[in-house]
Image (cartoon, coloured by chain):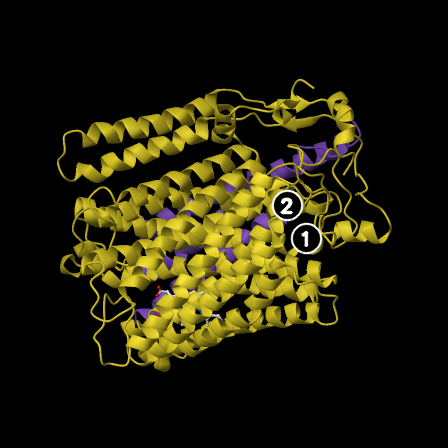
Amino acid sequence: MANLQSNSGEPKVNYEYRRKKSAEDMRMQVVTFTMMIFFTVIAFAAVGAGFSKWFILPFVLLLAIVQVVFQLYYFMHMSHKGHAVPQFFMYSGILIAFLTILAFLTIIWW
Amino acid sequence: MSTIAHTQKRGFAGTVWEYLTTVDHKKIAILYLLAGGLFFLAGGIEAMMIRIQLAVPNNDFVSAGLFNEIITMHGTTMIFLAAMPLLLGFMNAVMPLQIGARDVAFPFVNALGFWLFFFGGVFLNLSWFLGGAPDAGWTSYASLSLASEGHGIDFYVLGLQISGFGTLMGGINFLVTIINMRAPGMTYMRMPLFTWTTFVASALILFAFPPLTVGLFMMLFDRMFGAGFFDAAMGGNTVIWEHLFWIFGHPEVYILILPAFGIFSEVIPTFSRKRLFGYSSMVFATVLIGFLGFMVWAHHMFTTGLGPVANAIFAVATMAIAVPTGIKIFNWILTMWGGSIQFTVPMLWAIAFIPSFVMGGVTGVMQAAAPADYQFHDSYFIVAHFHYVIVGGVVFGLLAGVHFYWPLMFGTMLSEKLGKVTFTFFLIGFHLTFFIQHFLGLMGMPRRVWTFLPGQGLETGNLISSIGAAFMFVGVIVLLINVVVTQVKNVKVGIDPWKDGRTLEWALPSPTPFYNFKQLPLVRGLDAFWIEKMEGKTEMTPAEPIGDIHMPNNSFTPFMIALGLFIGAFGAMYHVDDKGWALPVLIIGLAVAFASMLYRSIKDDHGYHIHKEELLDDADKGGTR
Ligand code: HEM
Ligand SMILES: [Cu+2]
C-alpha cells in the first residue's frame, strides 16, 4: 500500500525512489513465495516419511505459523509503515485469544 | 443553495423519509436515542411489574411463568436494547464532532447498524404477542433454555443475533473513524476522554461480540436442528454456553461502563472549569480496563465447580480491575478539587455517580473473593451489586449525557429545574430500591425468585425496595415531561450553551451544519476549544482553505437489508413447527436482504459535493467554526 501511493501529490518527484522500493518488494515476495512452497513440500514430506505424530504436529504447526507471518508481512505489506494500529489490534487479539485458550487448557478443564 | 436542501423545511412525511434513509451520524444518533429511549421505557415498565409482584409476600400480581418472562425481558432489554444503543447514540452524536470529522468512516454501515439493532429489538419484543417471551433469564443458561417450551428462547437467539450484528458494525465503524479521521493536530493523546472511551469500548465490542455470536449460533442449532453442543445426554456440555456467554458478558459490562466514564470525564472538567486531572493516567486506566476485562469472565462461574486453582486465579484477576477503576475515581475527585464548581444537572449526576458507583465496586470486590461468593452467588446481593454499577454508573451517565448533550443534539436546553426534580426523585429512589437488597440477599433471598413467604424477615425490605422503584418511575416521568415542555417551547440556544465547553463539539454553530465543519479545525492541544477561548478567540483556527466537501447520499437500502433479515428470522423460527409458510418466508426474507446488498454493491453511488461557492454563501450561518 505505502509503496504504491505517493504522498507528495507530485507523482514524478519520487518516481525513481518508488521504482527501487517496488523492485525490492518484488524480490522479497518471490523469495518468500519460494520458501512457502518449500515449506509446504517439507510438511507433506514429514507426514509421508511417517515420523511420530509428536514430531509432525508441532512441526507442521510451526511451518504454518511462519507462512502466516510471511503472508501478513510480505504479501499484505504489514512490513511497511503505517500499519501500527492494525498490528496492535492483531497482536492484542492474538494475546487475548491465547490467554483464553491457555486458561481453558490449564486451569478450567484439567 | 440548491444542494443544501437539508436546511429546507419539510413536511411530516418528508421528515420521516429523511430519517428512514439518513446516513448522517447526527440523525442516526437521534434515532438511537429515540429507539433506545422507547426500549428503556419498556424495560422500565417490566421493572415496575417485578417490584409490584415482590412488594408483599405471597403476591400473585403475575403468575410464576409470566414473572420469569418479565425478568428475562427486563434484563435483556435494558442491556442490549436500552443501555448499549443509548450509549451508541451519544457516541454517534458526539465523537465525530469531538475529533473534528465530517462524519463516521462508513455512514452507510452506520445506518445499517442502527436498523439491524432496531429490527432485532422489535423482533425480540414481538415475542410478547406471539406465544410468550423468553424465560430463561438474560444469561439464558443452556440447560434451562434448551428445556424452555414455545418460541421464547428462539426470539431471544434470533433477535440478539440480528441486533448483535448491528452493534458489531457500529463498533468497527467507530474504530475506523477514530483511527483515520481525526482533524489535523488531533493526536491520540489529545483526544477527549469520551472519544478514548468510545475507542476502547468499540475495541471491546469487536473482540467480545464474536463469542456471543458463536454461542447464539450453537444455541440456535441445538434448539432447531437437534444439535447437541450443550446437551450432556448427547455428549455436549452445558457449561460451554456459560463460558461463551461470559467471555462476551464481562467485556459487555465494560462496553457499558466505559462510555459512561467518558461522559463523566467530559462533564466534570466542564463544570469544575479545570482540565481533567491526570489525563494520561485516565487513558492508561481505560485501556488497561479494556484488557483486563477479557481475563475475568469465570468470576461469574465460581460456583460451577471450576476448582480452587481456577477460582483463585480468576479472583485475583478480578480484584486487579479495581485498581485502574480506583485511579479513575481519584482523578475525578482531584479534577473537582479546587475547581469552581457549578451544580448544573449533568454535574449533579456526575457527583452522585462517584459514591454510588464506588459502592457497586466494593461489592464487586467482595464477590470476587471466590469463597465468599459461594454465599453471595444467585442471591439478591448480586442484584444489588450490578444495579449499583449499572444504574449508579451507566444510567447516571446516560442521564448526565442527556442533559449535557441535549443542546448539542437538539439546539434547546432542558429545564434545569425539572432536571433537578428528576435527579432528586431518581437518586433517592435508586438507593431506596437497591441498598436494602444487599441485606435481603445476605438474609437468603434468592435472585429471580417469583415470590416469598411472610414471617422470614423479608417483608419490610422488599416493600422499601418497591417504594424506591416508584420514586425512580416518577423521576423518569418528570424527565419525559421536561423533554416535551422543552421541545414545545423550542427556545434555541447558540454556540457553546454551557459557556464552559472545552472540546471541539462546542465550537460548532447550533444547529450543527449537516457537513459539521466547513473547514477542518486545527487542534493545538487537549481541550482544543478551551485553548482558543483562553487566547481570546471565539472560534477554531481552520486547518484548510474552504473547499468542496464530499457528502454521501441518503439511502433506503440499510432499512431494507435489516427488514429482510427480520422477515427471514420469522421463517427460520417457525420452520421447526412444520408450518408450510415458514420456508417461503425464510427464503423471501433472505432474498430481500441479499438483493438489497447486491443492489448496494453494483450500483455506483459516489455521493455528491457541496461546492465552495455554496459554503461561502453559507457564511452567515456560522463562519469557519
Ligand atoms: C470493581 C469492578 C467489579 C468487580 C470486581 C465485579 C465483580 C463481579 C462478580 C465477581 C460478579 C459475579 C457474582 C456472582 O454472580 O456470584 C459480578 C456480577 C455482575 N456484575 Fe460486576 N464487578 C465489577 C464491576 C461491574 C461493572 C462496572 C458492571 C456493569 C457496568 C458490572 C455488572 C455486573 C453484572 C450485570 C453482574 C451479574 C451478572 C448476572 O449474573 O446476571 N460489574 N460482578
Ligand atoms: Cu463480570
Task: Please name the residue shown 19% across and 54% down the image.
Answer: B146
Q: Nearer the viewer, mark 2 or mark 1?
A: 2
Q: Residue furthest top?
A: B2
Ligand 1 is in which quadrant of the figure? bottom left
Residue B333 occupies quadrant: bottom right
Which residue type carries mark 1?
A: Met
Three-letter amino acid code of the residue under disc 2: Pro
- Which chain: purple? A
Q: Is B446 on the left or on the right of B493, as rendered?
A: left
Say few, some or many: other residues with alpha carbon within 10 Å of mark 2 (under 14 / 14 to 19 / 20 or more).
many
Residue B297: tell me if it is visible. Answer: no
User: Where residue B326 appears, x then y in whole percent?
Assistant: 58, 73
Q: Is residue B587 above or below residue A75?
A: above
Number of marks present in the image shown: 2
Q: Which image quarter holds the C terminus of chain B?
A: top right
Q: Which residue is mark 2?
A: B407
